[in-house]
Amino acid sequence: MKKIVVVGNGMVGHKFCEKLVNKDVSKQCEIIVFGEEIRPAYDRVHLSEYFAGKTAEDLTMAPAEWYAENGIRLILSDPVVDIDREAKTVRSHHGLVESYDYLIMATGSGAFVPPIPGVEKDGVFVYRTIEDLDLMQSHARKASKGAVIGGGLLGLEAAKALLDLGLKEVHVVEFAPRLMPRQIDDAGSRVLQAKLETLGLQIHLNKNTQEIVGNGVIEAMQFADGSRLDVDMLVISAGIKPRDEVAKVAGLEVGTRGGIVVNDALQTSDPNIFAIGECALAHQMIYGLVAPGYEMAEVVAKQLTSPPAPLLLRGEHSDDKTPLSEGEGSGVRLFSPFDMSTKLKLIGVDVASFGDAFIQEPNAQTIVFENSAKGVYKRINISNDGKYLLGGILVGDAEQYNMLLQNTKNKTILPPDPEDLMLGSRGGSESGASGVMALPDEALICSCEAVTKGAICHEIVENKVITLDGIKKCTKAGTGCGGCVPMVKDLINETMKSQGVFVRNVICEHFNYTRQELFDLVKIKGFRTYDEVLDNLGHGDGCELCKPPVASILASLWNEMILEKGNATVQDSNDRFLANIQKNGTYSVVPRIPGGEITPEKLIVIGQVALKYNLYTKITGGQRIDLFGAHVGDLPEIWEELVNAGFESGHAYGKSLRTVKSCVGSTWCRFGVQDAVSFAIEVEERYRGLRSPHKLKSAVSGCTRECAEAQSKDFGIIATEKGWNLYVCGNGGVKPRHAELLATDIDSATCLKYIDRFLMFYIKTAEPLTRTAPWLDKMEGGINYLKSVVVDDVLGMGETWDAEMQLLVEAYKCEWKEVVDNPELRKRFTHFVNAPKVKDPNVKFEPMREMVKAGEWK
Amino acid sequence: MQTITWHLACSTDDIPANGGACALIEGEQIAIFNFERRGEWYATQNLCPHRQQMALSRGMIGSTGAEAEPKVACPFHKKTFSLKSGECMSGDDYVIKTYPVKVESGQIFIGFEL
């Protein structure tokens, strides 16, 4: 049995193990992994998310159990300190000696710390591991001014981390005259800088740090130009340094500036030792990105699994000027110069560079687009004959990155106006998607996992895998950085279309229409009942899939009493009884408490009703009171008592507006800048009873402290000194989403107008049971398009929607009151039609503290 | 030979069009469905076997497939059952009891087999 020892358990080391497991090698070989850190490999690319709420577990690539399950021995907190190449053994820090047949160096890199006097002082950190982050976190509690040395990719990530840690001032100090000097040009850097400054970073370019000043603890940075910056925390992120110490001592060849020298097969100067990831010096460079690291893992894993043994390749470095083409001679895969194109989101700003980003006249023509107001800079470089895209840079908006990258890599012939590629589809909606189809099969869609377009299409066509999750599972595309996910989605849709198997999202077997089509048809024809809709637009008898969405469309259009005109039996379970069915068949009742404001008198009534009907009472997350355990036959009486006390239905049962949460705002709070409660009540009363494709939640906060959590709502409003900021498309739940900013510093009337339009647009176009966040996700152009529709009224629908919303607002009636006042409707609220006074004997309660809970079900 | 005893359940007005309601017959909870669209009546046990809830009568009815099999969906988790055979149509092994229904001069009778 061959024995493989992996030195290092970072992302690339882990990926190597994963590749071995996938190739079933783990069963034929003994595999041992030594890791220096205390935890198994984690996602270092998304390290900054640790401060944004992710835990170490969230970032873990695979738990320790995964290694055990796959027969891999994982030894943590115990780095390899010595390699005996003669004996083919390694020795760990704790003295463990293991022999190897193949040794894989995956030691990664450490932070490069320039020799500045004072770097040893307290408060100076590097930014590489979770331990580094923990140290920063505890220091940050007593710090307020922080700086980062290094304006590259990692430096800006570290700066984001400092912002996330709550530092009041964050400075970025860069030696070069621009930010991210490896990825973007001067103009791009200027736009990025302006954008980052609006986000709270202070950027200093051309700054050479001469000394870190302070008595044991950092107090200031002294620069070569004589200036000085007071800080109480500093992160050094000036580059990386390959971890080649052990390799060097073992006599392996290393580069003059570090890195273990490898050939195209990734063998070191010892043919039994390989190096992968950031410790490897391939093609005379360190590949400091995760995608090439993964490719290296693949190259080595493949060699170890496919005979003949890789021992013959020694000496064939690509700088020998006779590069081997892939697989030539030996049948093994080689590591060829890797495309370093990259796209990332830095502190919310997209930055991308691809191909030859810096090539310029006279070697190429460049096309530049700049919108400094929006913080967008785009540059593409095309060949002098105008035929090919060579590379480019995107700052502020990198939506076209994938397409541009593919056009570059595949040497696609450019359209006559190549700027269209850079600026995206303007007007037409076709170009984005048809672009994917124009790519050749060998186009690499997912560069992290090296998945081609052909491989994805094969799964779609041959194996009928037509969901993103399915494609992720069978090809692994989109599981790395996730940047290719939009392209994968396009591929699925477009491939299905081209196969003629494209299934429109029709409602169900009874209606050959999408919800949006049905909505428009019902409106134009003026249908008011489900039966009319089914008779004229559908066929068959209907079912539980089409009844609720049609009922919802009718309610959204006309806002008529949902239990009349024969529509009662097409309502979803809860709507039909205007209450929420609970575990034992009883219902819960939630009266509306707009904005969460309630008088003592009304509180007393709720208490009295709960006592009388033996209801369990609980404060909900939406600042109202839920009364549980009501028998269906008691509902009208309960409502009657509540309605008589001035309550109305809270629509907790409907796909409709639930509640508008609020904080107390300027009426009491010493920080409040606007009266959040009054506005919340106004908003809630405006949209109460409004039925929509899914539930709607809202909140109003009286100041930027955001105590009402408005940014987690479908539409949330936050007070500013000048008015309100309106956020849309957030939610809590399974997949929490932060709402996105739609408009800033608007007055109350404008705010309501924008919400009207936003809601009407959503109600008209969303698919059934789609909340606002996934609706926005599917919208081409995203939040910017939504803004143009709601704020700039590019569809010209604004006034129509205003009027339609006004009709709905005016048509509002309390559904409970209508039942209470209507003997015919009241009659339906019984458990036994032939014994209206008898309650369901199967309903069981169990005592819990001083109240009751529903009997457990089986 | 099987004998069926017919029990008066309620009047036809008591059951909403294209929906259901529950009647208490001989201590049993029976869900009765007025499939007005097809001019058909169905009756089943009211208990949904999935979570043992007395709820089928409050479910939505409809049909599915080329044969337009009539069905009811439980309001709790939308398990669907054939109104004809009682078989669960959402992939589980449950079967619910079905009962013959007779309508005479505006009155609904449910048949119990002895």
Image (cartoon, rainbow, N blue to C red):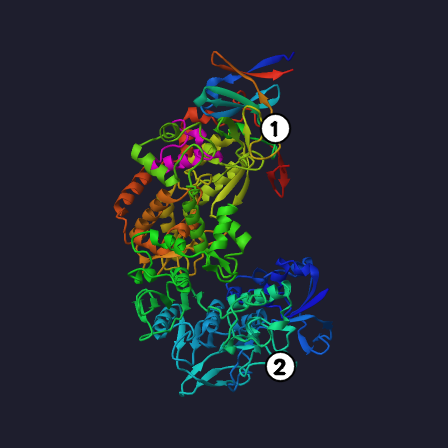
Give A268 or A781, whichever is nearer the viewer. A268
Task: Say if the magenta span includes residue A479.
Answer: no
Mark 1: which secondary structure? loop
Which x, y percent locates residue A351? 41, 67
Q: Is there one chain holding both mark 2 and mark 1?
A: no
Instruction: Report, in whole angstroms, how far the alpha carbon at label 2 lies from the one at label 1.
Output: 73 Å
Q: Nearer the viewer, mark 2 or mark 1?
A: 2
- Chain under label 2? A
Which x, y percent locates residue A370? 30, 67
- When asked about the image quadrant of residue A552, the answer is top left
The disc label shown at residue A849, or none: none
Q: Which residues are magenta?
A: A545-573
Q: Please, what is the three-letter code of the amino acid marked with disc 2?
A: Lys
* Left or right of A820 on screen, residue B76: right
Q: Measured along the vertical axis of the image, is residue A477 above or below residue A83? A: above
**Looking at the image, which residue is at 36% across and 65% down?**
A389
* Res A11 visible: no
Q: Which residue is mark 2?
A: A248
- Chain under label 1? B
Give B114 or A298, whichever is nearer the viewer. A298
Q: Please, what is the three-letter code of the amino acid marked with disc 1?
A: Val
Quarter in which the C terminus of chain A is drawn: top right
**Looking at the image, which residue is at 40% across and 78% down?**
A204
Q: Which residue is mark 1?
A: B95
Q: Measured along the vertical axis of the image, is residue A630 above or below residue A594? A: above
